[in-house]
Image: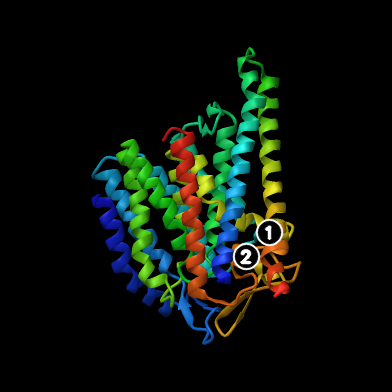
Amino acid sequence: MGLARNILMIIVLLILVWAIFLLVSYVITVTVLYTLELPGDTIISIARVVLGLIIAGAWILGWYKLTKLWLYKILLARKRET
Amino acid sequence: MLEAMVSGLVTFFLAPAVIMLGRRLEIVGVDVHKPWKPIVPKTGGLAIILGATAGMILGAHVSGFQLLIPVILSCLVAASIGLIEDLRGEINPRLKPLLLIFASLPILISGAYSPRPLIPFLGRTRLYRVYPVLVIASYPVVCNAINGLDVLNGSALLTSIPFLIMSSVIFYMRGDLQLLILSLVFLAAAVAMLPYNMYPAKTFIGNSGSLFIGAGITSIAIMGGIEVAAIIALMPHIMNEMYVLFSIRGLKSAKNIGKRPVIVEDGVLTASKDPDAPITLLRMICAGNRIDERRAVYAMTLISAFATLLGFLTHILLLGG
């Protein structure tokens, strides 16, 4: 049962990370989409890419923090309780 | 489909020969997860390399699928780096990603990619300057990620197979015969190696095998324009690699990490509770449990299959198939 629970919890984590990825993708869309209407400008293009990379980087960092929390507070904590 | 059959058959029938070669040349490793610590040849990857390459050469020359040529070169570059590691020991962990960049060159030089990836909600982007940089970065990341999950008997193959099934289905639905053949060639080679690599392994696929498959998966994702589906499908691989990088604070050799993520006692795996031990997928699976190697591999496979399902759903529902 312990293994099945761990698999389920990791799957829940994957769903969360996937949902956050879609949210990040949506945020990038909202922040970037209107700039596509602006006339071609190198600075805007670079700013767009940098913003996209910062948001993606934040997603990865959040993913790591969430995983750390998952391992120590949920998966490993369970054994200490029993 | 002949290409996939050739790939599978060559891999399957060459495997005993490369196992024998590994024993004779003493290209072997210790299977540390077994109580009896068997010595196992780590040359199984050679059969995968030869099988898949034979399939791709057949596709390129007989069926006229020229797109397969840069993939062959890319995968062989990655496999060569892995082979050096199998023969001479681990390459400096800072140098290895740089060397794996060379695997991206055949794809970049041949221009076998579209710099307009599909992003959910945003649609088709125009990343003419950024995309080549992402192609360069993707090979070290994915190759190392596949390599990083090659920790138990059959784990690298069983966690790669769901992605290859997904890409085959997507290309079949798209009616892209060339990319379908490419995916099936890798799928056939991976499946054909399973009887030799699964518990109890008669051979390891080695770094040559895992880096070859990693380069193949990267090429399929880039050339097929399924980057987002690939990122999602490979989440377990990427997070395993990412956790290790974050938790050991940088690129370090596994031998230089004092704390082990998983403890092995009489063939039973338990997760380390040490907060300084690297966070890995296997450690998460084993957390609070005592499980054997076989069940741990099945768990990894199930998690990979689920991530692949999420990748497939994203591709179909949000990217319009």
- Give the left or right position of residue B195, taking residue B95 as reference: left
Disc 1 crowd rating (10 Å Cα; few below 14, some 14-19, many 20+) is: some
**Residue A70 — which label?**
1
Q: Crowding near pointer 2: few (<14 within 10 Å), some, many (20+)? A: many
- Whether residues under marks 2 and 1 lie with C-beta atoms below 8 angstroms apart, the answer is yes
**Which of B292 and A74 lies nearest the eye of the viewer?**
A74
Asked if one can make out residue B209 in the rendered structure from this viewpoint, the answer is no
C-alpha span from label 2 to label 1: 9 Å
Residue type (three-letter) at the residue carrying disc 2:
Met
**In the image, is A14 to the left or to the right of B211?**
right
Q: Say above or below: B247 vs B65.
A: below
Q: Chain of mark 1?
A: A
**Relative to residue B109, is residue A77 depicted above or below?**
below
Residue placed under numbered mark 2 in the picture: B284
Among the 4 quarters of the image, the one containing residue B8: bottom left
Residue sitting at 43 percent across and 73 percent down?
Answer: B203
> Which percent across, then down, holds residue B319?
47, 34
Residue A44: x and y in percent read: 69, 21
Residue A62 or residue B90, whichever sits in front? A62
Residue situated in front as seen by the camera: B82 or A43 = A43
